[in-house]
Image (tube, helix red, strand yellow):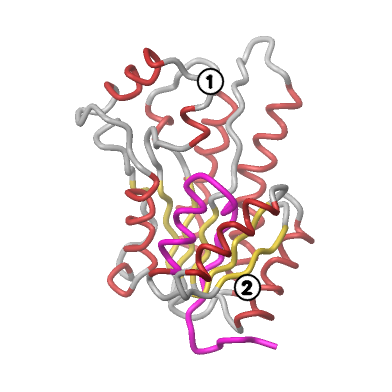
Amino acid sequence: MAQASTTKCALITGASGGIGSVIAKRLARDGFAVVVNYAGKPAKADEVVAAIKEAKGQATAVQANVAEPADVEHLFKQTIGTFGRVDVVVNCAGIMPMVPISGGDIKLFDNTININLRGSFIVMGQAVKMISPGGRIIMFSSSVLAKSFPGYGAYIASKAGVEGLVHVLTNELRGRDITVNAIAPGPTGTELLYEGKSEQTLETLRKLSPLERIGTPEEVAAVVSFIAGPEGGWVHGQVLRVNGGFA
């Protein structure tokens, strides 16, 4: 039975760490009941839920692989069953392996497309069926599309596809009170970004932006908060490049 049918609910995929976990905490602070989706890190997801509850928010963790239709259907049904509704869907789940086009591992390519693009397609399709009137669908792309760095072929292909899906779904939702947009962050200070990188590499990343710094997950979450909030209802069919002028 739903716990809080009058409280708006946000479902965030890939919310067990990185940018997703910060978005989950920000939307909880904004007053949303939050579903913290994770694929394989239950302890991390539980930490996010515990932090939200400690701050007097409402949250629950639900496991699902976004590339599996049955998992995603269960995720949405569990969300409705727990909180009675879903008003905001943020699809933050994704992977970013380096795969050169010549000689690259085709299995890594397939897995990247499977999670990043197929997963987005499945989440978007389920969101349209289940989201409340006035709902917001927020996908994740990347500002690296403008740079075409070597080794990013699989990732860029997947995220270019996500942007295409956003524009198509915008038109498919004509006449419905539901918006769909994408966030395309530049280099953002998460564990994934810093892991294994030298200070020289990090300095190069800083210099990519005219602001000469790396963005924060909180800055990305603030833009999600705006789109998800009451003043974001006229933003539709857009890709917001939250990157400090990176591209």
Can residue 119 be seen here? The reply is yes
Q: Residue at x 37, y 12 (%)?
A: 200
Gap between marks 2 and 1 measured at Cα: 41 Å
Instruction: Please identify the quarter of the rendering in which residue 105 is found.
Output: top right
Instruction: Please identify the quarter of the rendering in which residue 242 is found.
Output: top left
Labels 2 & 1 near each other (Cβ < 8 A): no
Element carrying mark 2: helix
**x, y percent for residue 15:** 57, 54
In the displayed orientation, state which residue is furthest to the right: 70
Q: Residue at x 52, y 26 (%)?
A: 195
Span colored in magenta: 1-28
Q: Which quadrant: the N terminus?
A: bottom right
Dot 2 or dot 1: first in sequence order is 2
**x, y percent for residue 130:** 61, 75
Q: Nearer the viewer, residue 24 or 65?
A: 24
Q: Nearer the viewer, residue 31 or 150?
A: 31
The answer to whether residue 24 is magenta is yes
Q: Nearer the viewer, residue 123 or 191?
A: 191
| Callout 2 crowding tier (Cα within 10 Å): few <14, some 14–19, many ≥20 | few
Can residue 247 be seen here? The reply is no
Q: Label 1 sits on what residue type?
A: Gly
Q: Identify the residue under disc 1.
A: 196
Q: Which quadrant: the C terminus?
A: top left
Marking on residue 129? 2
Q: Label 2 sits on what residue type?
A: Lys
| Callout 1 crowding tier (Cα within 10 Å): few <14, some 14–19, many ≥20 | few
Tell me: residue 158, above or below residue 81: above
Q: Residue at x 59, y 42 (%)?
A: 94
**x, y percent for residue 240:** 34, 48
Element carrying mark 1: loop
Instruction: Please identify the quarter of the rendering in which residue 186 is found.
Output: top left
The answer to whether residue 19 is magenta is yes
